[in-house]
Image: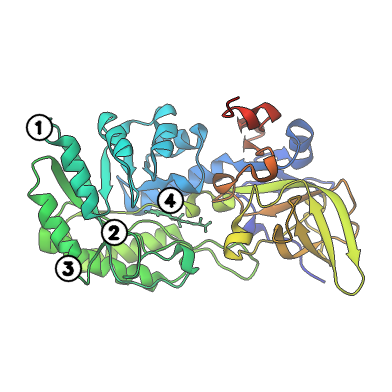
Amino acid sequence: MTNPISHSLLPDNSTVDDDGMLAIGGVRVDDLVAEYGTPLFVYDELHIRSRCQQAVNAFGDGVAYAAKAFLCTAMARIAHEEGMHIDVATMGEAYVALQAGVPAESLVFHGNNKSEDELRYAIDNRIGRIVIDSFDEIDRIERILSNTGETIQALIRVTPGIQASTHEYVATGQDDSKFGFTVSTGWAGEAVERVSSSDCIDLLGIHAHIGSQVFTLESFRRAAEVLADLSNLFQLSELSVGGGLGVAYLEEEETLDIEEWGQTIKKVCSESGVTARVTAEPGRAIVASAAVTLYTVGTIKKLPGIRTYVAVDGGMHDNPRPALYGSGYETFVPRRVEDPRNFPITLVGKHCESGDVIVSNGYAPDDLVVGDILATPVTGAYGHSMGSNYNKVLRPAVVFVNEGSHRLVIRREELSDLINTDIG
Ligand code: LLP
């Protein structure tokens, strides 16, 4: 017998109607499915806004939303309206944020291999901050700006030599990393000196991102110490500790608190006498638990003594995280959200491979039938944003709910979208 899904994994404004059906933001899940179909990402707008507010309260002006976690024009507008800057990692992310009406000044442009086109795009659009990642990038920027009389504002990304305990694919703070200027080799200091003496680069400060889905505040504390020393040494005015705050996906995990994260980092910085503006760049912590994905059950295959496969109309195209990182999720049935889930299932998608598993150890109520709506919570970050058209599957729709109303923010793809870029 397994417990009902715990409310801490559901969006903040989740309630249960008298008949047992889940409602999010005051809208019943079955009504959303009737209107928009499945697979469907449902985001609780007030949940997103509240996490943005927490980030602004914890860090103050300059804290950025890491758009790679989830981006569309509606999302960019919300982050901006709530007072956040936006971290963009490519020209594409910058384009979406600019199209949403976010002022270029509020954008922070990242990337370990920004092309000349991307740098020109950032410069031409007057993007507020470019985070320089390598000596080659310094060369590229100087080449583009030489004899133009133009200048850019920049941060230097440093690699502090901190091994954060997380999946190796998303650990970025250790010396052996493709990102940033290594502190231990002296390159970070060299980069600061070189950029400081550049005529076309106005160096505002330093930045580090030690990894994603990090649950140990101690790792952030150690990274902040390294950054504080550098910031003090060079008397810089901005210091960003990047993103990475861990979020619970499973019943036994516990989400870290944005406020506590801010206090930990600010404490290290103030004890070290940092005068720079201290800020951060959360992505997952803003949007992950704001959303659930809704699927329709299409096939139930009970293999006696082995397992029960429950196949839904989504899969690795709307959530590649289990296949990529072995990430775990929970499952539940929204019509019985308060009931025990005593039927062990393996939730799979519709793709042509056995690795297309969404949840290997899921649970559902034992009356699960074909046609039921099945949900995975905490899918607001790195689900839709990492989605694909594998097997020419149509990417799902995204709906925002808020105090009893709902609005489509990304429409479901249509077949004609699949040949939009084909020629001949
Ligand atoms: N800043 C920088 C420079 C980053 O590279 C990232 C994430 C963030 C901020 C935001 O990190 P967050 O707060 O969301 O952890 N696809 C992976 C996560 C990759 C994160 C990449 N960089 C996943 O699904 O777990």
Tags 4 and 3 in contact by the CB under 8 Å rule? Answer: no
Residue 180 circle label: 2
Query: On the image, numbered disc 4 is attached to which residue?
Result: 54
Amino acid beneath label 3: Gly
Q: Is residue 69 left or right of residue 395?
A: left
Q: CA distance from mark 2 to mark 3?
A: 12 Å
Residue 277 visible, this angle: no
Amino acid beneath label 1: Asn
Amino acid beneath label 4: Gln
Q: CA distance from mark 1 to mark 3?
A: 30 Å
Query: Can you say whether 203 is above or below 95 in the image?
Result: below
Query: On the image, numbered disc 3 is attached to which residue?
Result: 186
Mark 4 closeness class: few <14, some 14–19, many ≥20 residues within 10 Å = some
Image coordinates of residue 322 in percent, x first then y, are: 63, 61
SS assignment at label 2: loop
Residue at the far front in the pictured view: 424
In front: mark 4 or mark 3? 3
SS assignment at label 1: loop
